[in-house]
Image: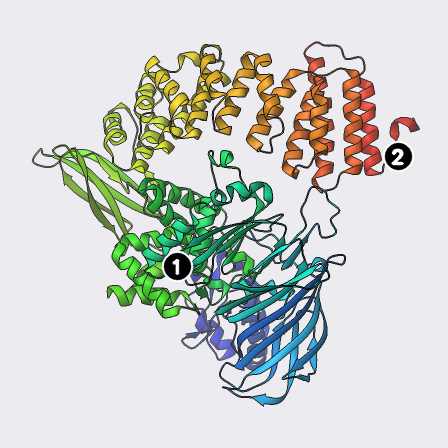
Amino acid sequence: MISVRIVGINEFISSLAKITFTMRFNLVHVVSFSILLVFLSSCKTGKDVYSWEYEVLYPTESDDFYYDDEEDYMPPVKENFQSSATRHWDLLHTRLDIGFDMEMEYVLGEAELTLTPYFYSQNEVVLDAKGMDLHGIMVNDKEAFFNYDGQQVTILLEEEVSRGENITIVVEYTAKPSELEMNTASDAIEDDRGLYFINAQGEDPNKPTQIWTQGEPESNSVWFPTIDKPNERCTQEVFVTVDNRFVTLSNGLLVNSKENGDGTRTDYWKQDLPHAPYLFMLSIGDYAVVKDTWRDIDVHYFVEHEYEDNARGIFKNTPEMLSFFSDVLRYDFPWDKYHQVAVRDFVSGAMENTSAVIFGDFVQQTAREQLDGDFEDIVSHELFHHWFGDLVTCESWANIPLNESFATYGEVMWREHKYGADDADFKRLDDRLSYFDEAQSKQVDLIRYDHDLPGDMFDRHSYEKGGAILHMLRAEVGDEAFYTALNKYLVDNAYSDVEIHELRMAFEDVTGRDFMPFFNQWFFASGHPIVEYSISHTYDDYGEPVTDLTFTQYASAEDTLLYNLSIPYAIYSEASGEYEMSTFFLEDYMDWVFLNGHNDILIDPRGELLVEWDQYTGYNASHIPMYMNQMTNAPWAYARFKAFNKLYFNIYDDDSLNMFYAVGLKDAFHKNRLNVLESMNESVGYAVEFDADPSNLFSSEVLALVQGLATSDSNYAVQAEALKVLVAVDANAHRDFFTKALSSPSIAVTAEAMMAMADIDLDKALPYAEKEQNTTNYTMLDAVGTIYAQSRDAKYQDYFENYVNGENGEYQTYYAMYYYSKLLAGLDRDAVMRGLDFFEYYLNNASGEYVSNVALSGMDRVAAGLNERQAEGELIEWMPEVDARIAAISNAYFGFEDVEEAE
Ligand SMILES: [Zn+2]
């Protein structure tokens, strides 16, 4: 937006209206401005002009017009300002008595709330209660009048209640979450029905019956009446009555369980420490409960029975994390217990309900699956919330980065502690990339009061950008000051709600330094700096060698500020053979420094700044020694990663590339070895694309290194990627490697080996596929399907059809149907017709939204595969029969007339 000030207009206007004003307007508004002048000149009296002008110029629609009375501007209207909720009442305690109607999917509840006026005397209470039937409300044991609009209930009090007095409200209600249609879903949370019945009537044989809740941001008021705001908090008791076969989980401690003699049981959960209503939770299902402890606190894992053996692995390192976070924050885990549960069809990834965290069922992995990757980041994220989010809670959703940025940074802290700084640096790289990706289409203030819905705040800004900012804050003040300030923030604000300035003040109090500039540029502004730098080796006036290091700063968006940046950089010392750290303070658009000698320099070698770097340089062979030195000698894996990428993306001759590969494949950090192998596979891909022979790409030294990694790298992803290089280069020559890898403990490695074997010797690969064919792991299913589809053997029809009919998840079924259609495309008439019958049966009988997609696209794939065979010269005489059958099935499904028959 370009703003222009018209000078001299005041005199013109004041002669008409006896008032003055100036206008700032957008160039596109020149036309409307001219119309305005015409209109003004036609007005008869000043009074008319004034009233007309007031109405038109008052800037409700657009902030392009500013009304100026003499000197002062009228402020633009800030739309959508999302204040924190006003505290009329302080909710002290909530006692719930909950049962269920599984047939109707209703919650049958009684809620008893204890409240006291926050400060001012009150004569009514407004509670959030979404989509309920309210059967009656008592205030202090007397029936009360209330108005209910389906979202909130206003309860009239007989007498005004003053500060210091408590009232008790009892609400009898039926909640109907499954009947609710709301639309405040966000990136983080897909739905907002508050409480979910999963397979409540038990009709789906492939799904357990479960009930679970998701409160954040303001959905718990669907299943109990409350003041559903993050700046409220109370203690709680939950009495929940369930069928005896289920276990229950809620916040706080399980006080007792009582058999009711009718096949049901009532569990009594109690939490004496106050927390926000969005953190209340319930989870009900048939679970194996695996019990751990940390210090004197119970730590339980709730998983489906088949995962019982690996429950500790699924919620990996929980006790150790409890110790680490308690110690580093110098603030012990503040809650009664720490339980974690995996639920079906969860609407988010996981949720930090106080002392009872819910995860999506995707976390349920076998120990073998975990060799190829796990969900430990989510475990640490939710646990860290128990300090940042649950103990100290954002007072409004505008301040959600106080919850989510910390939880995201908690993942980094745990990795740094457990797996080292290099591992944490790469996690932060992923986080930055995730934010930069969002920043391409969205750059907003991190703390923003003008969001539309609470859900809009749960974005890559609040998580990853905020996490990156916390890391910069830590780098800025040092570890000791950082953790001292966090401790002060927790101690000062325990069991209360906060806004961002409370974090700032903690840092100011601890360090004695003003943090308004830092918070202003990072928390209250949008965008990020883009910094271009150049490293030039030149000579000064005396002929001495100097390195000219120049930085130029650009804005990522039009309204992005000029940043003050402390840029860390490292200079290589020939004498010591080490890199030495320095800091460059960039506070202007452009600045530079001359350093003695021709230096090898690493800018931001650990990736600590949230900066988009842009190195200005013409790459050529003269840069090779510097980057090779960095790949060899830089002590930071991230710096070595950047050095390899600079070489790989800028220098293309095979000899040089082989030199880079040879160094990179020996890197001590597994993600760097993986990065080199992925680059090599990319090179193979390019070669194949341009009909070049990939077997000439790599030197014998490099191939020997890859062979070594394929058999014995400590990381299985590296082994699998190395195998992929070997098969791409020359599958036959590497047959021994695949044969050995077929018995790898890692699924990724075994699957890669099976597919490689199938390429050169299908008959040898088939028995391995048969051995693994009942897997539910996607990677393995992918390999089995790929191999069977290549077999062109009708006997595998039974396998796919049985798999689809079996008790497998939706995604597994999707895989099976995908490969079944690939298999069919290679078979004869009878087999294809039988397959189409199966698609038809499946389309009409299976349940789930994905079914029609899977079956219809499967039939398309069969037709496409058969057409391909014809294009390759095979005559398929029965093709018209296939086309007609597919048309008939889909027409019947969509309810069309059968076109073929009508003709
Ligand atoms: Zn979170």
Q: Which residue is mark 1?
A: 523
Please, what secondary structure does the residue beneath circle 1 have? loop
Q: In the displayed image of the protein, which residue is found farthest to the left?
A: 542
Q: Position of residue 799 (x, y in %)?
A: 69, 25
**Residue at image point 52% right, 18% down:** 756
Q: Measure the alpha-carbon separation of dots 1 and 2.
A: 61 Å
Question: What amino acid is found at the position of numbered circle 2 in the picture?
Answer: Glu
**Left or right, 73 with reference to 855:** left
Q: Position of residue 892 (x, y in %)?
A: 84, 34
Question: What amino acid is found at the position of numbered circle 1 in the picture?
Answer: Phe
Q: In the displayed image of the protein, which residue is found farthest to the bottom?
A: 159
Q: Which residue is nearer to you in this view: 190 or 370?
A: 370
Q: Is residue 648 above or below residue 481?
A: above
Query: Are the residues at dot 1 and dot 2 in contact (C-beta closer than 8 Å)?
Result: no
Q: Which residue is mark 2?
A: 897
**Residue at image point 70% right, 74% down:** 148
Quadrant the C terminus occupies:
top right
